[in-house]
Amino acid sequence: MGANSSAKEALNRDGIIPNRNLFAYAAGIAGQNMNYGFINGWLFYFCNNVLKISADAVGMITGISRLWDSINDPIIGALIDRHTFKKSGEKLRPYLIYLPAVIGIISLLMFKDWNLGSEKAIFYVLVLYLLWDLVYSMQDVALWGMLALSSPRSEERTRAAQWTAIGVTVGGALSGLVPLVKDIAINNFGATDKSFFFGAALILGLGGQLISMSAYKMKESVKNENAEKESLFEAIFVLRHNKTMLLISLARILEYIKLSVPWAYFFESQVFYKVGGMEIGGGTTQFVYGLLTGAPGTFAQFAATKIVDKVGGMKRVLVLAQVSSIVLRIISYFIGFKNIWNIVIVAVLMGLQSIPAFMVNIAHRSLMSDSIDYVEYKTGKRTEGITFSMQNFATKVGDAIALFINGKLLTLVGYNQNIAMTAQNAVFMKWQWPMFILGPIVGAVLYLAVIVFVKDDKEERKFIENELKKRREAATEKSKAELNSI
């Protein structure tokens, strides 16, 4: 017993994260992203094409709700930073076991068509989405904040960030099966959009959140010494010290300013191929395209830390990802999609771009985790909650911008949700390919304009890490001395 206890203490002291904990954490991330990928990818389509809410109205509703929700995120993050669970003394882990089932049930209800009519359906979806987002925000801040608490060592947090990226990819891949399964269910088994989306919400929405509970196995290895010692305003205002996080958040928001609409509109309206005697529709092509474009980046994630070293650091990964996206998208535009070989070549090019692109979130999370150490060095405060709430904030503001743009673009090209995709007007048909392949370039350019100002100094990072280690050791010795004097 004593030997085992000593081994555990040594493990914690060294900051090494056990592989079993990393795997459980990654599985939890995968489950959460099954939920998020499904809702983020298909709620607009479901409201527009199943509930028959106009594209402009859907863009306005979801955009406004996400903007409002984004305001709540820093407040939620600050409240989490100020709170410690009395029973366990933990800051974040308990949220990972208490919240998933609630989020999953709300997710399921959002994809239930009660035949309310479009006006009542607007209110129904809005209320459920606001509730979903409030609870999801708490889970999301805790889930990603655990990355910074997983170890006091930067290289271990980077390793954890690598595993989380794999989890995100797996979750995204599972939610990415939706168009393929949708094609099969509707064309071969007589399912309707209404029944299909409710079944998908049951598996990906509720099921994904139940899987996310495995993240609870990750341990908190860095103690939060400053909980409940500051006002809510002070907890939020500490953001001013975190330039890295602020720049990354701004860059991520600007990246959403892309003149495009969801993939499904392009693939289901434009793409239909005959190969031999086999007919390949838009949903199947979208699935294969996603598979081809995502596979290289997915496998590259397993060597993420080595790739980052080869490239020369996290910041260079971020720059390379956007520059390669701009260049390869322009080339792809001229290749086109008129036959199956064209779209395969485009998929291969986008697959090459996915290698640095799939490193982006690893770089973001690693840099943000390191920035928490910097804030602790400057202020003595740990800010996992407020820092990773800004990740959620950036995503929601960006989503809101994207949804506004989606609604406006679909309205401008005359999209009619009451007729089939393939029966849309000539203007709609003309603009789908340019929006799909070139639209994201706008966001890439804006992202680059901000990210170049992010600082990525390895020597400074090591210095801060060592200084914090000394402080923690001194605090531990002081606590022991106080206990011995009693």
Image: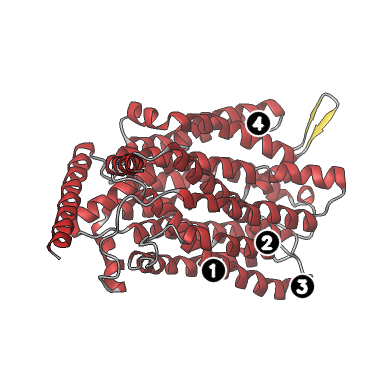
- The label number, if any, that marks residue 315 in the structure image: none
User: In terms of secondary structure, where does tag 1 sit?
Assistant: helix
First in sequence: mark 2 or mark 4? 2
Tell us which disc is closer to us: 2 or 1.
2
Label 2, on which residue? 108
First in sequence: mark 1 or mark 3? 1
Q: Quadrant of the N terminus?
A: top left
Image quadrant of residue 274? top right
First in sequence: mark 4 or mark 1? 1
> Left of 391 or right of it: where is 270?
right
Disc 3 to disc 4, how far (Cα)? Answer: 39 Å
User: In terms of secondary structure, where does tag 4 sit?
Assistant: helix
Name which residue type carries label 1: Ser
Circles 4, 1 touching at the beta carbon (< 8 Å)? no
Q: Nearer the viewer, residue 9 or 78?
A: 9
Label 3, on which residue? 117
- The label number, if any, that marks residue 343 in the structure image: 4
Q: Nearer the viewer, residue 333 or 118?
A: 118
Disc 1 to disc 3, how far (Cα)? Answer: 20 Å
User: In terms of secondary structure, where does tag 2 sit?
Assistant: helix
Tell us which disc is closer to us: 2 or 3.
2
Q: Quadrant of the C terminus?
A: bottom left
Could you classify mark 3 by the number of other residues whose Cα lies within 10 Å: few (under 14), some (14-19), or many (20 or more)? few
Name which residue type carries label 3: Gly
Tell us which disc is closer to us: 4 or 1.
1
- The label number, if any, that marks residue 65 in the structure image: 1
Name which residue type carries label 2: Leu
Q: Can you see residue 265?
A: yes
**Residue lying furthest front:** 1
